[in-house]
Amino acid sequence: MNHPDLKALFIEESRKYLGMLEAGSACLEGVIPAPGALRDLIRYAHSMKGMAATMALPEIERESAFLEDALRGVESGARKTGPELRAEILVSLACARVLVEEYGNG
């Protein structure tokens, strides 16, 4: 999908969600984050995944799915918080950010 208004909206929303995910990822350093904060992070990743799917951007969808799955893992207790998890999330966020910017410049 390449409608200019939708493209601009996707880029704007993606930047906003990426920023919130990056800021929120700090709470994953050690203790389990508050349920509300974790649910917000999951919602941001899920929203990005859906927007990327709608825009037919599979690479961004894949990074967003990874983020959502990692955060759901924390929520379910299958993943532990800590520096390793945060590092994985920051790498995925960086990849997603590059992909969003490339799409915006393309």
Image (cartoon, rainbow, N blue to C red):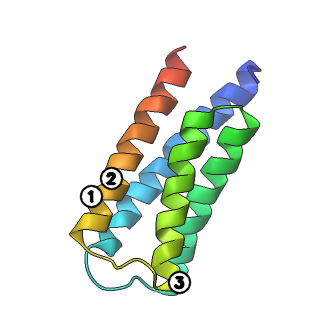
Q: How far apart are marks 1 and 2 (CA)?
A: 5 Å
| Whether residue 98 is situated above or below residue 47 in the rendered picture | above
Numbered badge on residue 73? none
What residue is at 61 percent from the left and 64 percent from the top?
Answer: 43
Measured as percent of width and height from the top left, residue 34 is found at 45, 86
What residue is at 40 percent from the left and 82 percent from the top?
Answer: 33
| Whether residue 84 is situated above or below residue 60 in the rendered picture | below
Instruction: Check disc 2 and report the residue beneath it.
Output: 90
Under mark 3, the amino acid is Ser
- Taking the image as shown, residue 11 lies to the left or right of residue 53, namely left
Whether tag 1 and tag 3 are in contact, CB under 8 A, the answer is no
- Taking the image as shown, residue 9 lies to the left or right of residue 103, namely right
Q: Specify the quadrant that holds the N terminus.
A: top right
What residue is at 32 percent from the left and 77 percent from the top?
Answer: 81
Measured as percent of width and height from the top left, residue 93 is found at 40, 47
Q: Distance between the residues labelled 2 and 3?
A: 21 Å
Under mark 2, the amino acid is Leu
- Taking the image as shown, residue 55 lies to the left or right of residue 40, namely right
Question: Residue at the top extreme?
Answer: 106
- Taking the image as shown, residue 75 lies to the left or right of residue 79, namely right
Question: Residue at the left extreme?
Answer: 83
Instruction: Check disc 1 and report the residue beneath it.
Output: 87
Kindly state the secondary structure of the residue where label 1 is placed.
helix
Instruction: Check disc 3 and report the residue beneath it.
Output: 76
Whether tag 1 and tag 2 are in contact, CB under 8 A, the answer is yes
Q: Specify the quadrant that holds the C terminus.
A: top right
Q: Nearer the viewer, residue 25 or 95?
A: 95
Kindly state the secondary structure of the residue where label 2 is placed.
helix
Q: Quadrant of residue 3?
A: top right
Measured as percent of width and height from the top left, residue 50 is found at 70, 49
N-term-proximal mark, 1 vs 3: 3
Measured as percent of width and height from the top left, residue 70 is found at 47, 66
